[in-house]
Amino acid sequence: MSDSSGWIHDSAGIDREKLAWIMDLKNNRRGRISEYADHFEGVTFTKSQPDPSVNGLWAVPVDVALPCATQNELNAEEAQALVDGGCTAVAEGANMPCTPGAVEIFQKNGLLFAPGKASNAGGVATSGLEMSQNSLRMSWTRERVDGELESIMIKIHQKRMKPPRSRYAWQLCCWS
């Protein structure tokens, strides 16, 4: 888990109780992730470096990796470190945080990979639905918005399951 100040490694894992503590820290107290290391025993905090490739974040063994900060934050070498560490899934939470070389490593090693275009689509689609309502001066129920969003997400999934028409489309969309 990380924020702009650095990242933590909890060798005991982050269970529901610890996750709730982090959520309170970030959402209510507006604290820094370093406070987690002060609060829980056996936790290592590593301060962010100007060059993220030297801080070792992606070399820590994890089950799931969620690169969510910036474009090209995870390269091929770091992707291989994730594979070697036992990572089974990567879901982008930013615009193209994985380099094409990293995506290629994930594909070659059979990792589940959710490109940002798919994993961020729910938020983008909901914003679009809100704009539609506003332009039509309408107010939809929560159930209607959920239904519209579900329909959009199903279409995205169905389209994602079809192979791209060309190698260029494969690289452009980063589908694995």
Image: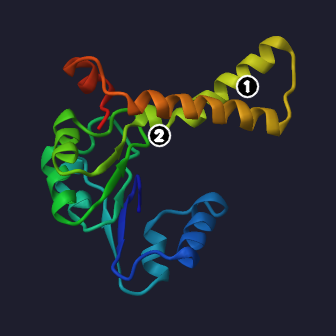
Looking at the rendered structure, the secondary structure element under dot 2 is: helix
Q: Amino acid at mark 2?
A: Ser
Disc 2 crowd, CA 10 A, few/some/many (<14, 14-19, 20+): some
Occupied quadrant, residue 46? bottom left
- Circle 1 residue: 130
Residue at screen point 41% across, 36% down: 116
**Residue 61 occupies which quadrant of the picture?**
bottom left
Give the number of the mark in front: 2 or 1.
Answer: 2
Check the image and report above or below for 74 versus 154.
Answer: below
Rounded to the nearest whole Å, what is the CA distance between mark 2 and mark 1? 19 Å
The earlier-in-sequence mark between 2 and 1 is 2
Horizontal side of residue 121 vs 2, given as left or right: right
Q: Residue at x 84, y 28 (%)?
A: 140
Residue that label 2 marks: 119
**Amino acid type for the residue under numbered disc 1:** Glu
Say left or right for 56 vs 34. left
